[in-house]
Image (cartoon, grey):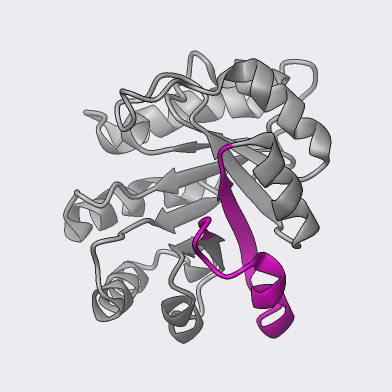
Amino acid sequence: MCIFKDKEFHIISNGKMPIEQFREILIDIHPYVTAIHLREKQKTARELFQTVQLLNSANIPLSKVFINDRLDVALVTRVGGVQLAFHSLEPAIVKESFPQFRIGCSIHSYEEGVDAKANGADYVIYGHIFPSQSKPDVAPKGVRNLSMLTQLDIPTIAIGGITPENTAQVLQAGANGIAVMSGVLDARDPLAAIKSYTKVLKIGDGKSGKFI
């Protein structure tokens, strides 16, 4: 099993892939990732619950599963955490009542990062950093803005157009890890794709080893 001392690797579902297919990919790749995000906005609470059950039946650790926004489903399924959006409850409110969860916030600006830190988020996912297929008409944030955000001293996970070739750039900018969707899920060989990313994460920021 790959265990990263300082760097994290998050995989995010795309809301379009059949969950059965997503599960088959996760069976191979889950030992290499830190977190598995269920970002399934179109699914009902019942459907999300059934999705978590399906993953659990394949021995995918629920401690690695994060539910986007749906605190109710996260509570019932006892997963590892929740990922909050701008319309969600504030992290401090969730953490006060449910301290067992690791709580992340999805942000798109420095100011949102300041708010997330002040409100008790455990980490933020920031992007998109590079041009992304999912947001072709929105300008990327870029590595310079990422570098400014990482000065806030809250763990920052970079997302958006992250490839094995540019992962080192975001780590050098101070990111604590990466979040990937199409780079793995749309790959012809997802396991090979995962290993390409982990080769870079193993080196960390290029200055010292970050892999144990």
* Foreground of the two, 143 or 193: 143
Q: Quadrant of the C terminus?
A: top right
Is 93 part of what is drawn in magenta?
yes
| Residue under the point 28% across and 70% down | 51
* Foreground of the two, 210 or 18: 18
Residue 125 placement (x, y as % from top left): 58, 43
**Direction from residue 40 to residue 141 in the image, left or right:** right
Q: Is residue 66 above or below residue 27?
A: below
| Residue under the point 30% across and 72% down | 48
Residue 160 placement (x, y as % from top left): 45, 30
Q: So how many labels did they put on this image?
A: 0
* Foreground of the two, 16 or 152: 152
Residue span colored magenta: 84-108
Would residue 168 be seen by someone viewing this image from the given angle?
A: no
| Residue under the point 25% across and 33% down | 186
Residue 192 placement (x, y as % from top left): 35, 29
**Direction from residue 111 to residue 61 in the image, left or right:** left
Is 58 part of what is drawn in magenta?
no
| Residue under the point 66% across and 45% down | 112
**Direction from residue 207 to residue 17 in the image, left or right:** left
Would residue 50 be seen by someone viewing this image from the given angle?
A: yes
* Foreground of the two, 109 or 160: 109
**Direction from residue 109 to residue 154 in the image, left or right:** right
Residue 99 placement (x, y as % from top left): 71, 78
